[in-house]
Amino acid sequence: MKIERPRGTRDFLPDEMERRRAVERVMREIAESFGYREVSTPTFEHLELFTLKSGQGIVEEIYAFRDKSGRELALRPELTAPVMRMFVNECSVMPRPLRFYYLSNCFRYERPQKGRYREFWQFGVELIGSDRPESDAEVIMLAYRILKSLNVNFKLHVGHVGLLRDVLSDVSEKDRAMRLIDKKDWEGLRALLKEEGQADIFDTVIEISEASDVEKAREVYPDFDYSYLEVLFGILEEMDVRFVPDFGIARGLDYYTGVVFEMYAEGLGAQKQVCGGGSYRLSGLFGGEDVPSTGFAIGFDRVVQVCSVEILRKPKAVVVGFGDSIRAFRVAEMLRSAGIHAIVDVMGRNVKKQLSYADSIKADFAVFAGDELERGQVRIKNLRTQEQEDVSLKDLRGYFSGFLNSGS
Ligand code: HAM
């Protein structure tokens, strides 16, 4: 019986994994260059961690289950709540601000479609301890630099949930209203506001969502303090971060309290959001002191689909043995010490079949572990140029050095 993989999950074959690792390397290097250090949290958490802020409604959207002792658990749907739980439990006395990054798999019980999976990966950061515009500027700049370095064609939108939350201040189901705004479900929003006797603010919400700069937003809604946004926008402009002010960003998650931002990439169709983030306060809710934080998560799988990245591969040699496997293993070890990937026949094949296998796996060299070994040499055939020469075992590193570090 053939067993299929679960819906919304994927297998990654070696070519795909090489590409994913190359993308990952760029993300890690840039985050580390900003002073961020990697953290890792459990794949599953107490369900409560995710329902505390969002309510029981979220259970429908996540993988929640009971373990054998009846504990209510959930596979993490994201990492901001887990990282803040970790912060409260383990890091509250560390010097602030804290700069953490992660690359981890997340699980959401979604309707699978292109770019939307039930298991997917997020590369994200959390900057913990500051409520100043500089901290939002830093995380936005970091996400921006990562996507630029990966040659993603994207647009950055930056807004502030405080503005819409202010407009909705008399609406009791504010989080529900924000989720409707996030989905641009205007009919749903109209109905909710009507139900709550707040139908008159519907037009203000729409006008704010459409305001293209601070001046326009101020005209529509003067009662908000725009100074924080003005400082942030000023820094971003000076630092050459191109963005569109967007006061209609509501974000699907409930914990944001201030600046919010999203990035949308070309070439992904409906699931074009490749990054989302903003500032929030969660540590108080998890039993710690109330510490302001900001962060983002990049949809790793979506970025892998649309980015271009250089994949550095080491040259690959097939060691052609002549029935003496120990000799072939020895030569392979020497090649590996010289920085080459070396592959030995384990199928008892004859020389012709070993060479045709080398061809089929696109090896760069065939290295013959033959009688030359008695003279301290191996015969090396460059499979790209078909040139062949005898190389002293002592000179292997020198021979291959010209082929190392060349991207393919
Ligand atoms: P989020 O917007 O829910 O934010 O997710 C971040 C990114 O993950 C999205 O922009 C999208 O690219 C990707 N993503 C979400 N769901 C899926 C899926 N089903 N399949 C593939 N990719 C997906 C957060 O999770 C926040 N924790 C971000 C954050 C960090 N805010 C502050 N700090």
Image: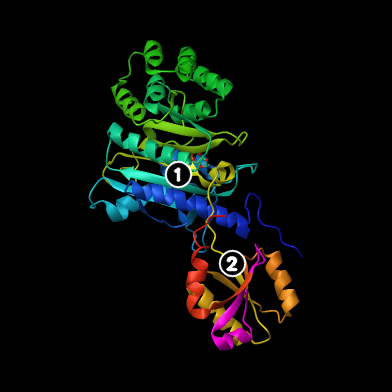
Asked whether 66 falls inside the magenta stretch, the response is no
SS category of the residue bearing label 1: helix
Identify the magenta region: 367-387
The answer to whether one can see residue 259 in this image is: yes
Q: Amino acid at mark 1?
A: Thr
- Amino acid carrying mark 2 in the image: Lys
Q: Is residue 283 visible?
A: no
Quarter assignment of residue 213:
top left
Q: Residue at x 62, y 69 (%)?
A: 365
* Location of mark 2 (residue): 316
Query: Mark 2 or mark 1: which comes first in sequence?
Result: 1
Residue 304 picture location, percent across and down: 56, 46
Q: Secondary structure at mark 2?
A: strand
Q: Which residue is mark 1?
A: 51
Q: Is mark 2 within 8 Å of ligand 1?
A: no
Q: Is residue 242 left or right of residue 232?
A: right
| Quadrant position of the N terminus in the picture | bottom right
